[in-house]
Image (cartoon, rainbow, N blue to C red):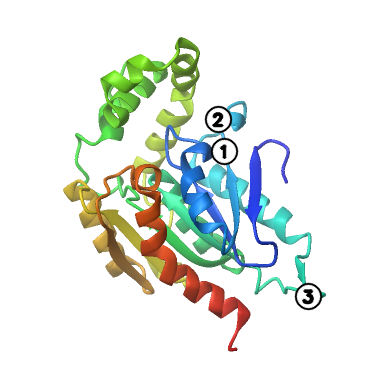
Amino acid sequence: MPGHLWSERAGHVGDPIVVLVHGSMDRSAGLLRLSRRIDADHSVLRFDRRGYGRSRATGPPWTVAANVDDLAELLDATMAVPDVVDDTAHTAEQRAAVLFGHSFGGNVALALAERRPELVRAVVVYETPLSWLDWWPGNSAGSAAMAAADPGEAAEAFMRRLVGDDVWERLPARKRDERRAEGAAMTAELADLRRGAPWRGDRIAAPVLALYGEHCRPHHHAAMVGLAEMIPACRSAMVPGAGHAGPHTHADAVAATMAPFLGDAHGAVRGPG
């Protein structure tokens, strides 16, 4: 794997690989519960995006394009080592990945599906922001954070909005400092996303599942339902009981909702019978 990003692979070698791409002010650990719900049936690759967690020292640039480069490099490195099951090496087409992108990570996944279609078998996105659109609200968590005076304050404002003041205040000082240090990556990538669409839906051939939580905000619901009109092979589905943090808080429900979609991708890899 590329040395500048932390990554970890688990699950069944030879099965279709599912790559989990976390959102802003998150890290791969936030998707660990979801990984454990699906790695019994699939090979799962988690990684910390540039500027976050164990990849905090990587960057800039903190842009969608740079994150797409990183993800492509990870997949190229993974596919360079043949998976062999029952003495049969899987072809590159059979080993193309299913991408799961939470929030900002969904835009990275969709952009890779457009740029490097040979690497992507299917895409699942969960409440991915379409913040370049004119109707995107100015009071979203990202928009509110961008109004802060400096990146550290922006990171704290974002975290307080997502986890609540009580949870933030209970974090050890070292953890709060680490999260504030990630503010530079967050503000840069969110500003980049607001400059314009990082992908074109009519150029994405892979099937896409757009998930939203039952308790999501109206703009996230509109975005995920709207993706079906922007991307030819896209459909949307609701995750019962979940909000924007559904992959963290409702991993079982997210995994169950996406299971048939993953099963279809798995079957397409293995072929009939």
**Left or right of 60 on screen, residue 196:** left
Could you tell me which residue is drawn at 29 percent across and 64 percent down? Answer: 237
Image vertical order of residue 51 relative to residue 220, above or below: above
| Kind of residue indicated by mark 2 | Gly
**Mark whose residue sits in front, 1 or 3:** 3
> As rendered, which of 206 and 65 lies closer to the eye?
206
Q: Position of residue 13 (x, y in %)?
A: 70, 62
Q: Position of residue 47 (x, y in %)?
A: 59, 43
Q: Is residue 134 visible?
A: no
Q: Check whether the beta carbons of the residues at disc 2 and disc 1 lie within 8 A of each other.
A: yes
Q: Position of residue 269 (x, y in %)?
A: 60, 77
Image vertical order of residue 59 relative to residue 262, above or below: above
Could you tell me which residue is drawn at 58 percent across and 88 percent down? Answer: 272
| Kind of residue indicated by mark 3 | Asp
How much space separates mark 2 and mark 3, taking CA atoms? 37 Å
| Kind of residue indicated by mark 1 | Asp
Q: Position of residue 75 (x, y in %)?
A: 65, 56
From the image, tell me which residue sits under label 1. Answer: 48
From the image, tell me which residue sits under label 2. Answer: 53
- The numbered mark, 2 or 1, whose residue comes first in the sequence reads 1
- List the single residue furthest toward the bottom: 273
Q: Is residue 182 visible?
A: yes
